[in-house]
Amino acid sequence: MSVRNKFLLDPAKAVLLVIDVQERLCAAMDQNALQRLTRNIGILLESANELALPVIFTEQYVKGLGPTLGELRQRAPAAPGIEKLTFSCCGNDDFIKQLKATGKTQVIVSGMETHVCVLQTVIELLGEGFDVHLVKDAVMSRSPDNKQTAIEAMVLAGAVPTSTESVMFQLLKIAGTDSFKKLSKLVK
């Protein structure tokens, strides 16, 4: 695989995964960090919508943690939402079916908690041969140390560390288009 294919996103190959950004779990998070997270995931969702990327939401034990935050869910209402009990999304057959049905090979990963569900999912996605782009400013944990340790582990395992703006501009590829004009306003 070439460096370009691994490190640069291609809208024809990419899917956005939003892991477990749920109401009751969000209540346990630092609210300033949560605000940044929801802003960044919102930008990723707007980018996915504009560029016709598939989106998959997952939800861990909805009965206990509640649904995905409404402000995020409303940005991609047609996207599948998959309830799971396994920490890794890959432990859920419905998730694997939905992901494989997209035909995409690049997975843009966002969500929480970084050191639990995100970490386990990323490791398993890498093991399945997917190119994983970990959006560092669109993942969080209750503890910054847990988040940082998990990010380091995922990068060592082969995930590509990235940021919300990098993802957006890699997917856009060129300035001056209607999509560029619409999405670039989100990061000003």
Image: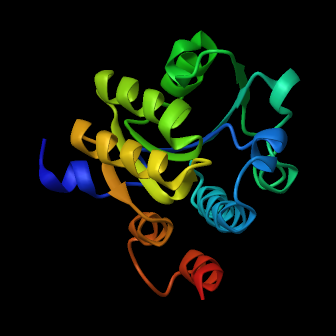
Q: Quadrant of residue 95?
A: top right
Task: In the rendered view, tell whether residue 28 sits above or below residue 163.
Answer: above
Q: How is the image coloured?
A: rainbow
Between residues 45 and 140, which one lies in front from this camera angle?
A: 140
Q: Quadrant of residue 97?
A: top right
Left or right of 120 on screen, residue 21:
right
Q: Residue furthest top?
A: 93
Residue drawn at x 76%, y 47% is 28
Q: Residue furthest left?
A: 2
Task: In the rendered view, tell whether residue 53 sits above or below residue 118.
Answer: below
Name the spot of residue 160 as percent of width and height, x first.
30, 50
Left or right of 139 on screen, residue 32:
right
Q: Quadrant of the C terminus?
A: bottom right
Between residues 127 and 182, which one lies in front from this camera angle?
A: 127
Residue drawn at x 37%, y 36% is 105
Name the spot of residue 175 as percent of width and height, x first.
44, 84
- Residue 9 visible to the viewer: no
- Residue 123 visible to the viewer: yes
Residue drawn at x 38%, y 71% is 173
Name the spot of residue 96 as percent of width and height, x first.
53, 18
Task: In the rendered view, tell whether residue 107 sits above or below residue 181.
Answer: above
Name the spot of residue 18 as percent of width and height, x first.
62, 43
Left or right of 76 on screen, residue 102:
left
Q: Quadrant of the N terminus?
A: top left
Residue drawn at x 49%, y 68% is 168
Q: How many marks?
A: 0
